[in-house]
Amino acid sequence: MENRSPGEEDTDDRSPFAIGYAGAMKVMSVGIEAVLPILLGVLIDYWLGTVVLFTFLGLLLGGFVGYTQLLKIIR
């Protein structure tokens, strides 16, 4: 959302469905960006035979990326 003055017009000519869909896609992308590094870490741990090293690194990376993307959406 943009900060607008009370007299300013809304220039977004998309339908309410399209606006809602775009917002849902932003939120879904945050979820994917947070979960995908964890899943890749589990897969790498399985391939290399390590216990939870890459899963933990994926958790840290996914949390950081998800958090930064969420902050971008909020702003």
Image (spheres, grey):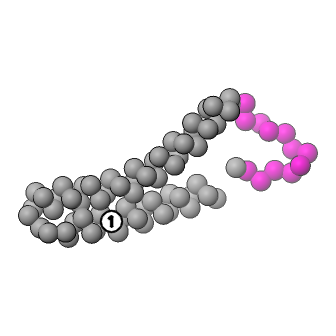
Q: Amino acid at mark 1?
A: Leu
* As drawn, 75 above or below 25: below
Quadrant of the snapshot with the C terminus = bottom right
Q: Which residues are magenta?
A: 2-13
Crowdedness of circle 1 by 10 Å Cα count: few (<14), some, many (20+)?
many
Hey, which residue is sitting farthest right in the picture?
7
Q: Is residue 32 left or right of residue 43?
A: right
* As drawn, 23 above or below 66: above
Main secondary structure of the magenta stretch? loop
Q: Residue at x 61, y 38 (%)?
A: 20
* As drawn, 68 above or below 28: below
Q: Residue at x 9, y 62 (%)?
A: 48
State the image coordinates of residue 46 (x, y, percent, origin top left): 12, 58
Q: Residue at x 51, y 42 (%)?
A: 25
Q: Is residue 28 magenta?
A: no
Q: How many marks?
A: 1
State the image coordinates of residue 12 (x, y, percent, origin top left): 73, 35
Hey, which residue is sitting farthest left in the picture?
49
Quarter holding residue 37: bottom left
State the image coordinates of residue 10 (x, y, percent, origin top left): 80, 39
Q: Is residue 11 magenta?
A: yes
Q: Is residue 18 left or right of residue 30?
A: right
Q: Is residue 56 left or right of residue 21?
A: left
Quarter holding residue 24: top right
Q: Is residue 66 left or right of residue 47?
A: right
**For numbered disc 1, what is the local secondary structure?**
helix
State the image coordinates of residue 15 (x, y, percent, origin top left): 68, 29
**Which residue is the site of mark 1?**
59
